[in-house]
Image (cartoon, grey):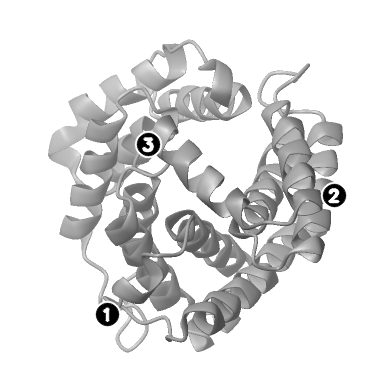
Amino acid sequence: MWLAAAIVLLAALADAPSGAAALLAEADRHFSRRGQDARGARCHPEPIDAALDSYRAALASDPALVPARVGILRSLFFRAGYCGEGGEAQKRRFEQAKRLAEDSEKWIEGHVGAKLRRGRVEPFRPVPGAAALFFWCGVSWGQWSLDHKLAAAWQGAARRVRDLGELALALDPEYEQGSPHLLLGRLHTESPKIPLVTGFVSRRQGFEHLRRAHAIAPANSVARFFLADAMLRHEPSSRTQALRLLRECAAADPRPDYLVEDRHYAEKARERLRALGEAP
């Protein structure tokens, strides 16, 4: 997986101006330090803020630099979710991400000369990093939707998340340890089924995606937690397996590359077990 990601990054950098490439490398270094000196599941904002500054400078230098777009979206998600922000500050981060997602969708449509459409994958295959861009655009729409439910319904956000997730899945199903499966799995297991809005929602498809993500990366705390959560909500016969997944998530040593993320989901797993009256 990491080799494939490195190849995609090198392909994108080959055509980037040297200044933009240097800024992107600097941003990646800052992002890699996001868990440095973290207090449990909360990280210090300085590394991620520095990453955002450098990713934005790289994108300003070269709007065609897809990894810079991905870096901003990913960093906004991390800044809002893992640095102790809440309320209006967090909401503003997700609004920024949603605006960049819309801009990025328009940019890639203009770049390839084709509209984003469900099942229309081929025009986007030649674009290095397209899978990552579609995935993080989908995440950004999804997070924004949680704070703007009425506006999200009017703008067809759920369908947008589905279409972007399916495009990411078609281009690279194992991106970030099967994350396109996680995005689609959460969409189908969390969204209410509302005629004309989310009538496409399928719990069966949701479980298929979540189980596939867990199979791709069994040690991924996010996959463990999301699958366990869906089982507890929609599949009572799987309670024993769900509790096992939560305990595994709670007890696992954090992975060095996902230190804060794993701590975050370990704490969520412990909280869920306590709420169920179960021992961690």
Q: Earlier in the sequence, mark 2 or mark 1?
A: 2
Q: What kind of residue is marked 3?
A: Gln
Q: Residue beneath label 1, please? A: 199
Residue 53: image tag: 2
**Compared to 160, does 47 lie above or below?**
above
Q: Nearer the viewer, residue 223 or 35?
A: 35
The label nearer to you, 3 versus 1, is 3
Quadrant of residue 97 within the rendered picture: bottom right
Quadrant of residue 44 within the rendered picture: top right
Q: Position of residue 278 (x, y in %)?
A: 37, 19
Q: Residue at x 33, y 51 (%)?
A: 172
Q: Secondary structure at mark 2?
A: helix
Q: Is residue 42 left or right of residue 239?
A: right
Q: Residue beneath label 3, please? A: 177
Q: Quadrant of the N terminus?
A: top left
Q: Is residue 221 left or right of residue 234?
A: right
Q: What kind of residue is marked 1?
A: Gly
